[in-house]
Image (cartoon, helix red, strand yellow):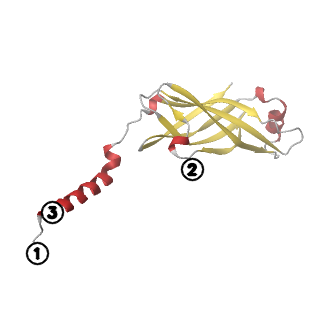
């Protein structure tokens, strides 16, 4: 059986499309300079509904993500460990993974964008009783520390950037 010229063209076109799909991530890879991306802890606040005598406190953490790359980026996830005056309060995740790219925080070139995590809950326990009371009574006197990683994305490129920061 001889393959005609039309079938050769059709097979070639199908092969070209298949190769383009397979090699697409390599063709459009966008290099992200991680030295030009930073994540800082901007502020920690006690949610207004966290009242005296409560067994748990809700905190609002605001992170500042800095992009000095010449391209626009976004973030899909920030994983971090929170400490207050040296006491480990737990590990938390701020996630935008279930949100389409056009709904995530946009990190334009040369900008600082704030992202807020309001799902931080501190439960009162014997091990955390002293810091729990300090947070409840005077949150501004606490030295906050976060260490973690942020997932930074640009189109088809996804990288993880580690960070560590303290407040006062």
Reading the image, the residue beneath label 3 is 6
Pick whichever, 133 or 68, lies toward us: 68
The quadrant of the picture occupied by the C terminus is top right
| x, y percent for residue 32 | 41, 35
In the image, what residue occupies the spot 82% across and 29% down? 138
Element under disc 2: loop
Residues marked 2 and 1 touching at CB (< 8 Å): no
- Local crowd at mark 2 within 10 Å, few (<14), some, or many (≥20)? few
Residue 121 sits in which quadrant?
top right
Residue 80 sits in which quadrant?
top right
In the image, what residue occupies the spot 35% across and 47% down? 25
- The mark found on residue 1 in the picture is 1
Q: Mark 3 and mark 1: span between their CA atoms?
A: 14 Å
In the image, what residue occupies the spot 79% across and 37% down? 131
- Local crowd at mark 1 within 10 Å, few (<14), some, or many (≥20)? few
Q: Mark 2 and mark 1: span between their CA atoms?
A: 52 Å
- The mark found on residue 98 in the picture is 2
The single residue placed furthest to the right in the displayed view is: 53
């Amino acid at each position: 059986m001889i393959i005609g010229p039309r079938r050769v063209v059709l097979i070639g076109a199908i092969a070209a499309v298949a190769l383009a799909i397979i090699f697409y991530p390599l063709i459009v890879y966008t290099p992200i300079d991680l030295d030009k991306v930073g994540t800082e802890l901007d502020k920690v606040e006690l949610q207004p509904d966290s009242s005296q005598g409560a067994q748990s406190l809700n905190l609002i953490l605001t992170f500042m993500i800095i992009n000095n790359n010449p391209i626009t980026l976004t973030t899909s996830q920030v994983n971090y460990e929170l400490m207050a005056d040296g006491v480990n309060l737990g590990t938390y995740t701020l996630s935008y993974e279930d949100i389409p790219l056009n709904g995530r925080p946009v990190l334009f070139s040369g900008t600082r964008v704030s992202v807020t995590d309001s799902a931080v809950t501190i439960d009162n326990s014997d091990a955390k009783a002293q810091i729990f009371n300090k947070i409840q009574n005077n949150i501004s006197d606490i030295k906050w520390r976060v260490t973690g990683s942020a997932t930074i994305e640009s189109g088809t490129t996804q990288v993880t950037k580690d960070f560590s920061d303290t407040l006062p």
